[in-house]
Structure formats: structure tokens, C-alpha cells
Image: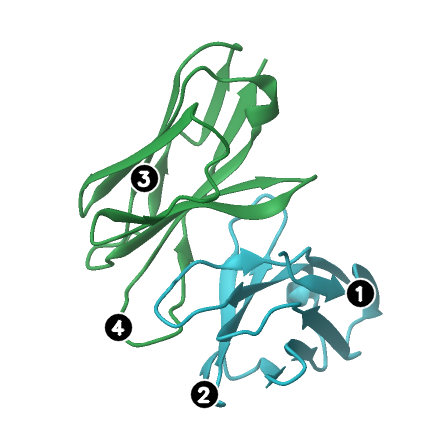
Amino acid sequence: QQPVQSPQAVILREGEDAVINCSSSKALYSVHWYRQKHGEAPVFLMILLKGGEQKGHEKISASFNEKKQQSSLYLTASQLSYSGTYFCGTEYDFGNEKLTFGTGTRLTIIP
Amino acid sequence: DAGVIQSPRHEVTEMGQEVTLRCKPISGHNSLFWYRQTMMRGLELLIYFNNNVPIDDSGMPEDRFSAKMPNASFSTLKIQPSEPRDSAVYFCASSSLAGVGNEQFFGPGTRLTVL
């Protein structure tokens, strides 16, 4: 089952904040976040693991609510370079590296 | 490091032809993933290998698709015969299973158009 992301699209002005949500119907082992710019490959942003460990870029923050099977990505003081489509990818089992990607959230930052 | 290398970058072929996509993972990575991305279905995993062994191929759409990884530095995804609905961007990604929750590094993708 594909995780569901919300919102589907958002437009922000530079400097504004955004929250992107990812919700799963199954229990999660980890959540990965990637950003994809048009015509390019997805690029890793962050991993959140069951138990609270996080790996990722310092300027990106995210949360993982294991009980609710949800994750949120927080983008603060957005910059033009943040534009792109954000995907969450979910791992359901420890040791199984299969990622099921969400529906995507298109973020547009305008000056 | 050169990153994940894919070839060709673009492929246009006619329905019924065989298509072979190639991938060279990052040196030292021992997991390799093939994804397909379309507007309708998004980014979906087709198959992944660990230490050259296929681990999960549940995303391979049908028998027309096959993937191999003969060694740690090379993998192929073959479609035979190709159909217009196979038109998509195919990404290869690799990761290093050093710990848990592993970042995947994506290649630039192959844009496949089947006429």
C-alpha cells in the first residue's frame, strides 16, 4: 500500500514555512524523505527510524510518530532552491530495504 | 566518486523490440534497486538486489521484464517485447548496507519511449 502524502501541492513565498505529511496504513520501520527537481533524479534528504534515530541534512527537520504511522517534513524559511517534488518512502520491515514511495508533494517557492 | 551510472539516458524504440537498460552502482555499495516512474503510478520499485542476489521482485510487472546482476558493478533491466505502456523513466539506485535505514543514491535515469 502506497503511503499518502498531503498536501498534494503547495505554493509558498520565499521565507515562509511548510509542512509535508506522510501517512501509512501499515506499521513502519523507517521513513525516508527525498526531493526531486524536474527532470532530475530523487535526492536523499533524511531518514527517520523506529526508536527515534535520525540521519540527514542539518537544515531539514522531520518527525516520525510510530503510533500514528505518520511522518512530517518541516521546511522553514524556505528558499527558491527548495522547489521540487517531495517524496516519502516507507520501509516496513527491518532488514528489507524495499521502499514504497508516497504520492508526492509538489512544492513551488516564488520570490 | 562518479555516482550511479545509467545508460542509455534516452531510448526510443518501437513496440515489440527488446530494450536493455544498464546500471553501474557506486563502488562498494552492495544493494541495487530498479525503479520506474510515471505520472500515473509515481515512483515504484521493480526489483532490488543485495550482494548480487535478487531479494524482492514483487514489483516486476510481468514476464516481459527481467533483471540481472552478474557482478557487483553491473546490472541490467530488460524488457522483451516492449509495449507503449512501458514508456517511463527508469531509475537505478544503490545503497551501502552499513547499518540500518540506508540512504539510496539514484542514477540520472533512462527515459524510455516505446512507440
Sequence-earlier tag: 3 or 4: 3
In the rendering, at what x and y percent does residue A77 appear?
Answer: 72, 81
Q: Secondary structure at mark 2?
A: loop
Residue at (40, 15) in percent of width and height: B18
Chain to which the residue tagged by mark 4 belongs: B
Cα separation, mark 1 vs mark 2, equals 26 Å
Cα separation, mark 4 vs mark 2, equals 15 Å
In the rendering, at what x and y percent does residue B1 appear?
Answer: 26, 57
Relative side of B20 to B45, left or right: left
The type of residue carrying mark 3 is Cys
The type of residue carrying mark 2 is Glu
Whether labels 3 and 4 belong to a single chain: the reply is: yes
Residue at (55, 17) in percent of width and height: B83
The type of residue carrying mark 1 is Pro
Whether labels 1 and 4 belong to a single chain: the reply is: no
Q: Give the labeled residue for mark 3.
A: B23
Q: Give the labeled residue for mark 4.
A: B98
